[in-house]
Image: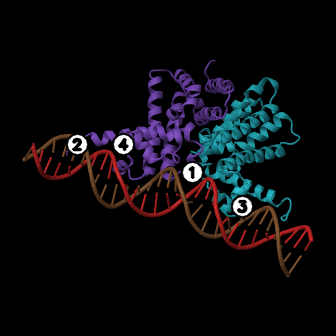
Chain colours: A cyan, B purple, C red, D brown
Amino acid sequence: MRYSETHKEETRRKVLKAAATAVRAKGPDSVGVAEIMAHAGLTHGGFYAHFPNKEALVAAAITEAFDQSGRRFARLTEGMSGPEALSAFVDIYVTREHRDHPERGCPIAALSSELPRQSAAVRSAYERGVLNLIGRVARWLPDERKADAASLVAEMAGSVVVSRAISDPEAAERLLADARRNLRLRMGIPQ
Amino acid sequence: MRYSETHKEETRRKVLKAAATAVRAKGPDSVGVAEIMAHAGLTHGGFYAHFPNKEALVAAAITEAFDQSGRRFARLTEGMSGPEALSAFVDIYVTREHRDHPERGCPIAALSSELPRQSAAVRSAYERGVLNLIGRVARWLPDERKADAASLVAEMAGSVVVSRAISDPEAAERLLADARRNLRLRMGIPQ
DNA sequence: CGCTTAATATGATAAGCATCATATAACGAT
DNA sequence: ATCGTTATATGATGCTTATCATATTAAGCG
């Protein structure tokens, strides 16, 4: 073993992180292997030492993106009660910041419409992420509302995604504010 | 004038209809000019007699897709009162049928995530369609709820889009049913 | 019935991209 | 310091696709 034990694993992680950003920014099909490698500070040829093909990278990148935002949510809601955590979650997710930065946001909002057309492996990585997020929300909800988790996630993602279509920033912000209010209502959180 | 007056216009419309379906089915970037022309019963070369380039076709196709579903909604809610129309709209939009057929459904649900990356001309055709749909919903709502129209459309689109990520048909249907119930609540429609 | 012209088809070109074969470089053990 | 090995780079290859140049076909007119 000539290179350090961890060297290859480290570059793999660099590639993966670059991919997680690039896939959200440009979409799985429009992003190129060479482009991702360049973002990781490498050239395209070495790619196949780390992943068998582009599809495997995309699937791994989607998982990584979900993990990233999952860790972020966990960190920012640590030690909170259910309602507090839900309220904080809404304030992180349904925002202009999220609307304006798909590349570091939730993969659902970044990839929703093109994912159904991806390969089975990619779709399945995506579905795992979606179900995880729904599960996270359900854990915060009181028992009698747990069943709403999926629909709440859908409302959050839909708000961000539609707000991206609206070029007027104030109209977009109004949409997001309305959505936040309605979400809190559905979650049983006092306004 | 050798061909009939209307001949060229008719083929243009055939190409446009094929494009409106294909763009929703495969996305603006993954669909090919040749593929669309083939669906219209033509070969790729003649394309440039009808549109200056692919971008113009995509923009026109998105407008056409919004028009198609707009006409459909108008037809199916004709003569209804506001609440009746809203209820019917929810029952048309937030359904398994819509989840399973993006190619003939709402362009928001089919294209939301990849549209922000398109050219200005395409985005603007899309935005017009989104705002039109929001306006249609607003017209049906009572005055005190009109401001919610955008957020309601976002919830509907989000529900369909997230339900497409869930492979279990029953879980997907549950999400849609929850969304329909909540939407009616927000619209002030008795369940 | 042939001729003209608009509409469509055929075929070429060039660019972009995933993948792979081969070359080079970095590293640590000796 | 040198060598062998592993990681990365360079440079094809083949395929797909938008676009365009040129050829062919269809339809109505004289």
| Residue toward you, A67 or C2 | C2
Residue to which mark 3 is pinned = A40
| B145 sits left or right of A13 in the view | left
Check if mark 2's residue and mark 4's residue have beta carbons within 8 Å: no
Could you give the CA–CA distance between mark 2 and mark 3, rounded to whole angstroms? 57 Å
User: Which residue bears the numbered disc 4?
Assistant: B42
> Is the Cβ of the residue at disc 4 closer than 8 Å to that at disc 3?
no
Labels 4, 1: one chain:
yes
Which of the marked residues, 4 or 1, is nearer the chain's N terminus?
4
In the image, which disc is placed on residue B3?
2
Mark yes or no: residue A132 visible.
Answer: yes
Q: Position of residue A2 (x, y in %)?
A: 84, 65
Alpha carbon distance from label 4 to label 3:
44 Å
Residue placed furthest toward the top: B191
Which residue is at the front of the view, A76 or A8? A8
Mark 4 lies on a secondary structure that is loop
Marks 1/3 same chain: no
Question: Mark 2 or mark 4: which is in front?
Answer: 4
Q: Which residue is mark 1?
A: B117
Q: Percent x, y for residue B23?
A: 49, 41
Q: Is residue B166 above or below residue B27?
A: above
Asked if the residue at tag 3 contacts the one at tag 1, i.e. Cβ–Cβ closer than 8 Å, the answer is no
Task: Let me know if marks 2 and 4 both belong to one chain.
Answer: yes
Label 2 crowding class (10 Å Cα cut-off): few <14, some 14-19, many 20+? few
**Quadrant in which the C terminus of chain A appears:** top right
Q: Between marks 2 and 4, how big is the CA–CA gap? A: 17 Å
Q: Earlier in the sequence, mark 1 or mark 2?
A: 2
Residue D1 in the image: above or below residue A4 = below
